[in-house]
Image (cartoon, helix red, strand yellow):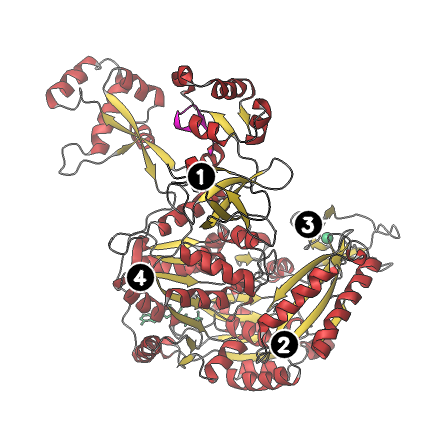
């Protein structure tokens, strides 16, 4: 055995700024490998964590290194591409290594809490082979059922007990990673087959005679033969549940036949994620798509990131499908990022039709086990195996963290969407930007696609940094929809509004319904959520933890805080004045749905927003209903705006354009243009020209004009002038520093210190400190400082300065209880 002592550097799933070095017990020397998980104790307590080995070396740190407790994996579960990518995210987004690990690994692959040690089910078989100390452990476990490593150390009065644990595992007396097993269990299913004795024609006849008086058993056996298709060329495996159903029998009958040695039960692992079979070839591209396709390919051959700017319904998705086909032919993996789970539902159907179960889905709505299954499948990917599942991953931003080893193509669909940005918790990353870095590491191609590109990406394309490819026409030469603006100021003055609907929108709705066409109504989520107000004294209910009003939810009849979840039952009398004149004001999607019910009582309406889509398959259900035309009107927030492809929608209504235009944020014009154009793009996609009605108090607003004219370029031109003048992206980079404290006065002092130190270095590139629009959330006050750095300056140098300021600050008295959060590229 070698005498060298090894050390490993671990990333632990904790918000700590460094990696920690641990000592490797000699008996683990052979097992350690970069990318494997180990169990290690951290901090003063006895808590154990799952860490990932990122480096193996022989250099002792200048602190007393602890031993690792166990090595969990036979093979690395994180590869070197990932470790490099994690490092980049950590450094670019000013995050801790543990934050990145937490975001990257599905939780079933990390044991954050104390690892439990339990007895092996057959521990009695080996009890005579145990040493005294080993026996002590087993004895303790017999009494206590489960123990953690620290408790065992206490029982034995020995510090380093990993040797014993390891031996006990080897002897099959205990199991240590039991919690892990409990979390990721392959799903098993029971099957029935004939026992060797019964699996013969002669015997089978005898058995039928034998059981002829037990009618149910005969039915079970007949049922089996039927399902098994015993006399066909390819007999089929028979699931126990299917047999019960077909033969209409109880499990007891099957058990009886097992006892009689007629049946045998066996277990098989099943894939949690349903298999899909490819059903059709991809479409042939039309002329414009073919041109785009070949332009993209030639840009790829030069290694350039490509921006595909194609108007809504120009058929971008079909171009992606062709590119995916090529990547698969080259035995490469494909990552297809989408901003919204709502959209995944529809696109996954389109992709699976062509690629079958080569397509895997990965997003936060998947449960832990499903996520772990996808992870393992991607980890196993073998380019020489024709039948690899999940070679194409479709997913929301977290899908970029999967263990790709042969990534060949990254597609970022709807690249302008702000949901690619993770705001909270750290790492606060932008998945579009980060996935370009990931693709670079793999030398993979990148395609960004949108009908309304972000100002950044379009700027990059104009500067030649990206290749720009454009598609100007809708597929099938359908015209772009006709966009009209309804002046609601005028309609209100003339008392012509029908509740929320202008005469223009109302009549268009009537007409569409008459023609059996479908309608999408869009209401921006920001602002205008319904609140309760007392008409007598003007009292409105406020959250007790946050600086916001409570939102009225009709369905539950409660008032909720959308920031912290605080909720109260809707009061019957005003808590301030005792009057009963309580009324709901403002309108959210729920209110719109209700109003439609009043004017169009026979029309079926569905609503898609945060509240109606909490359940796992809710998106799917709503989209299916609308697709199958069981529902005539779909009311929704941002979720209904992008990427969805319905053939019978002839009318789109935007209920209020103003609240998005006036949102206090430098991107509000860009976003308003994108939102309105995207939702407009849902109208008239298949044959007839669609119609869009925008309701606004400012019908002459420049952005509304741009939407009416389908004029992205003018919007872009105006916007970049403003951005340059006011020092915003894409000309400047922003870093937002948020300070939080439970007391406003103390927060003020700390924020002033921080800003002063920053100004000493960065001068007038520093804005603030200021209270944000909502200054108090979950009982803590927030203050923000913004740093603007020229694109040409080194962002790394700025971050280094910031970190220095931060490290000095946190030792000051004024910073007690202050939390500081960095957000790079915050908008
Ligand atoms: N080559 C083709 N052959 C047949 N049908 C096509 C073809 N290309 C596109 N389509 C159909 O045209 C419709 C619009 O295409 P698609 O959804 O790909 O547009 P898009 O550019 O992604 O739009 P959006 O930006 O609005 O998401 C879809 O129903 C699609 O199936
Ligand atoms: Zn609250």
From this viewpoint, which residue is outermost toward the front?
A: 3
Which residue lies at the image location 18% right of the left edge and 17% below the top edge?
Answer: 207
Nearer the observer: mark 1 or 2; the answer is 1
| Mark 1 crowdedness (10 Å alpha carbons): few <14, some 14-19, many ≥20 | many
The label on residue 332 is: 4
Question: Which residue is denoted by mark 3 in the rendering?
Answer: 565
- Residue occupied by mark 2: 789
For the residues labelled 1 and 3, the Cα–Cα distance comes to 40 Å
Q: Quadrant of ligand 1?
A: bottom left
Mark drawn on residue 169: none
Residue 383, relative to residue 492: is it above or below? Answer: above
For label 3, being within 8 Å of ligand 2 is answered yes
- Asked if 780 appears above or below 731 in the picture, the reply is above
Upstream in sequence: badge 3 or badge 4: 4
Give the CA distance from mark 3 to mark 2.
36 Å
Does the residue at mark 1 contact the one at mark 4 (Cβ under 8 Å)? no
């Amino acid at each position: 055995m070698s005498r060298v002592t090894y050390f490993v550097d671990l990333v632990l799933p904790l918000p700590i700024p460094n990696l920690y070095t641990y000592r490797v017990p000699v008996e683990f020397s052979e097992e350690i490998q970069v990318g494997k998980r180990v169990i290690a104790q951290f901090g003063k307590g006895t808590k154990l964590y799952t860490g990932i080995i990122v480096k193996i070396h022989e250099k002792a740190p200048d602190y007393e290194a602890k031993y690792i407790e166990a090595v969990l994996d036979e093979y690395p579960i994180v590869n070197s591409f990932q470790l490099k990518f994690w490092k980049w995210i950590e450094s670019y987004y000013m995050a801790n290594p543990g934050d990145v690990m937490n975001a990257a690994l599905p939780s079933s692959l990390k044991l954050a809490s104390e690892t439990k040690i339990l007895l092996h089910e057959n521990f009695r078989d080996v009890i005579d082979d145990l040493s005294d100390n080993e026996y002590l452990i087993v004895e303790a476990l017999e009494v206590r059922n489960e123990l953690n490593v620290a408790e065992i150390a206490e029982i034995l009065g020995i510090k380093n007990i990993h040797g014993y644990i390891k031996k006990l595992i080897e002897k099959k007396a205990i199991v240590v990673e039991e919690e892990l097993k409990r979390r990721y269990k392959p799903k098993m299913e029971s099957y029935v087959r004939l026992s060797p004795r019964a699996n013969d024609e002669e015997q089978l006849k005898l058995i039928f005679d034998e059981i002829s008086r037990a009618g149910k058993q005969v039915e079970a056996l007949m049922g089996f033969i039927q399902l098994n298709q015993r006399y066909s060329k390819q007999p089929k495996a028979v699931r126990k549940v299917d047999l019960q159903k077909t033969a209409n029998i109880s499990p007891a009958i099957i058990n009886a036949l097992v006892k009689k040695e007629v049946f045998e039960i066996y277990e098989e692992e099943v894939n949690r994620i349903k298999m899909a079979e490819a059903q059709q070839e991809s479409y042939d591209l039309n002329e414009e798509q073919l041109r785009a396709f070949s332009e993209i390919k030639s840009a790829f051959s030069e290694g350039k990131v490509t921006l595909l700017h194609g108007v809504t319904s120009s058929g971008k998705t079909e171009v992606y499908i062709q590119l995916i086909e090529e990547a698969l032919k080259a035995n490469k993996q494909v990552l297809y990022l989408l901003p919204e789970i709502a959209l995944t539902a529809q696109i996954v159907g389109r992709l699976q039709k062509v690629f079958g179960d080569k397509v895997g889905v990965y997003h936060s709505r998947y449960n832990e086990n499903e996520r772990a299954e996808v992870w393992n499948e991607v980890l196993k990917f073998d380019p020489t195996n024709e039948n690899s599942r999940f070679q194409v991953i479709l997913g929301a931003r977290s899908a970029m963290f999967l263990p790709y080893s042969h990534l060949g193509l990254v597609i970022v669909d709807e690249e302008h969407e702000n949901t690619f940005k993770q705001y909270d918790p750290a790492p606060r990353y932008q998945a579009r930007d980060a996935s370009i870095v990931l693709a670079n590491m793999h030398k993979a191609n990148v395609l960004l696609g949108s009908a309304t590109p972000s100002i950044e990406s379009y700027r990059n394309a104009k500067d030649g940094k990206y290749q720009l490819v454009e598609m100007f026409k809708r597929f099938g030469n359908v015209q772009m929809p006709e966009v009209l603006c309804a002046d609601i100021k005028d309609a209100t003055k003339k008392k012509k509004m029908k509740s929320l609907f202008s005469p223009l929108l109302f009549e268009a709705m009537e007409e569409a319904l008459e023609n059996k066409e479908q309608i999408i109504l869009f209401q921006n989520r920001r602002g205008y959520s319904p609140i309760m107000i007392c008409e007598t004294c003007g009292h409105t209910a406020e959250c007790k933890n946050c600086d916001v009003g409570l939102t009225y939810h009709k369905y539950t009849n409660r008032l909720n805080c959308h920031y912290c979840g605080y909720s109260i039952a809707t009061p019957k009398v005003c808590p301030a004045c005792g009057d009963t004149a309580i009324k709901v004001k403002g309108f959210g999607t729920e209110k719109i749905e209700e109003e439609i019910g009043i004017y169009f009582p026979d029309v079926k309406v569905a609503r898609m927003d945060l509240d109606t889509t909490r359940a796992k398959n809710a998106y799917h259900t709503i989209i299916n209903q609308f697709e199958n035309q069981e529902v005539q009107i779909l009311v929704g927030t941002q979720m209904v705006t992008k990427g969805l492809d319905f053939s019978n929608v002839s009318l789109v209504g935007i209920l209020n354009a103003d609240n998005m235009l006036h949102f206090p944020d430098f991107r509000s014009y860009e976003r308003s243009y994108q939102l309105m154009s995207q939702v407009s793009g849902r109208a008239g996609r298949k044959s007839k020209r669609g119609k869009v009605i925008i309701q606004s108090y400012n019908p002459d607003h420049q952005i509304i004009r741009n939407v009416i004219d389908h004029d992205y370029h003018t919007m872009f031109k105006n916007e970049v002038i403003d951005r340059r003048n006011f020092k915003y992206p894409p000309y400047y980079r922003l870093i937002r520093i948020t300070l939080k404290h439970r007391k406003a006065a103390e927060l003020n002092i700390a924020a002033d210190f921080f800003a002063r130190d920053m100004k000493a270095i960065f001068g007038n590139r520093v804005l603030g400190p200021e209270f944000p629009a909502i200054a108090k959330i979950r009982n803590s006050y927030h203050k923000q400082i913004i740093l603007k750095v020229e694109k040409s300056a080194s962002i790394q140098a700025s971050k280094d300065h910031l970190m220095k300021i931060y490290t000095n600050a946190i030792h000051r008295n004024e910073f007690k209880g202050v939390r500081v959060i960095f957000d790079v590229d915050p908008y």
